[in-house]
Amino acid sequence: MSTDPHGGEPAMGPAELLVLTFPQETITAEAARALVKLRTAGDIRVIDSLVVTRSAEGVTSYGELADFEHLRDVIGDGGSELALIGPEDAQETAELLEPGTVAVLVLIEHLWAQAAAEALSAVGGRIATGVRIPPEHIEEAVRAAGGR
């Protein structure tokens, strides 16, 4: 985040909560490495993350990545995440999971859009909302447009 030119709150790029699901009961080291790459790539900032599991018996639990012993060497100190994803988010996600699966909730800030947010803020505007469109919907629309 950078400072608003008018001395107000820092301008922030759009934020988004992603729910990433995996077909096994625990997050793998490979999946954790991919999340660590997100933190270091520079296009986004990981604000917070939380792992939600549903055992084969249907029991749900949640925790930070650092709570998983097999991931500690992969994630290091975990960066400077804020604790913004809470138990309500974990419960809502758990209801979507099939038994024997895991999800990672990742709250990200789109740093690449920060310059646009700053420019809008300078003239009294803001990014009010956004819509996430799944890639398969875009691919379908492109195919349909090609048929015209």
Image (spheres, helix red, strand yellow):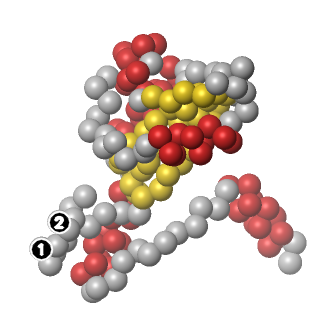
Residue 34 visible in the picture: no
Between marks 1 and 2, how big is the CA–CA gap? 7 Å
The N terminus: image quadrant: bottom left
Residue at (27%, 86%) from the top-left corner? 123
Q: Position of residue 136 (x, y in %)?
A: 74, 55
**Rendered image quadrant of residue 81:** top left
- Reading the image, the residue beneath label 2 is 3
Q: Is residue 117 visible?
A: yes
Q: Position of residue 103 (x, y in %)?
A: 59, 35
Give 89 or 28, whichever is nearer the viewer.
Answer: 89
Q: Position of residue 75 (x, y in %)?
A: 37, 24
User: Which residue lies most toward the top here?
Assistant: 70
Report the residue marked by disc 1. Answer: 7
The answer to which image quadrant residue 122 occupies is bottom left
Tell me: residue 13, above or below residue 75. Answer: below
Tell me what residue is drawn at x 42 percent, y 13 percent.
69
Q: Hey, what amino acid is under mark 1?
A: Gly
**In contact (CB < 8 Å): disc 1 and disc 2:** yes
